[in-house]
Image (spheres, rainbow, N blue to C red):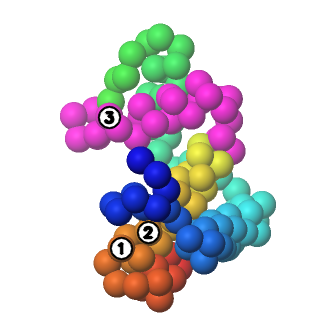
Amino acid sequence: MSPTAPGHWRPTRDLMISAVLVGVIAAGIRIAFNPLIPPLLNPDSEGYVQAGWNLVHGSGLDLGLRRTPGYGMFIAAVFGLLGERLTSIVTAQHVLGVINALLHWQSGEWSWAPSGGWWWGF
């Protein structure tokens, strides 16, 4: 299929600039505030961190009946990929936050117009 064929979508230069701007601003905000806020470990999140650590070390995912296993598995994946530090969890959450901003921007672009993408992305 040639690039000019009907039905073939190609991002425009303005679209790419908008996406990069939303991503850079979202990442910039997170980078600016990341050193100011230390990783918090309260009694609720301590159970998830312990469950993720146990899963990485082969002890299985042992959570209470009221807890969902998704966050414990997320922490185990982060510990496996980025190391067993609380800052690894914070870094992964910031990356997901930037991805979330980009997905919201894209939803706004599709739903409304370029201006809708800007509102939804920010």
Residue ID for mark 2 = 106
Under circle 1, the secondary element is helix
Marking on residue 14: none
Per the rendered image, the range of residues in magenta is: 64-88
Q: Nearer the viewer, residue 106 or 65?
A: 106
Label 1: how many residues lie within 10 Å, few (<14), some (14-19) or many (20+)?
Answer: few
Residue lying furthest left: 65
Q: Nearer the viewer, residue 55 or 41?
A: 55
Residue ID for mark 1 = 110
N-term mark: 3 or 1: 3
Q: Residue at x 46, y 36 (%)?
A: 74
Find out whether the residues at labels 1 and 2 contact each other: C-beta distance under 8 Å.
yes
Tell me if I can see residue 119 in this picture: no
Distance of label 1 from label 2 (alpha carbons): 6 Å
Residue ID for mark 3 = 69
Q: Amino acid at mark 2?
A: Gln
Residue 37, placed above or below residue 82:
below
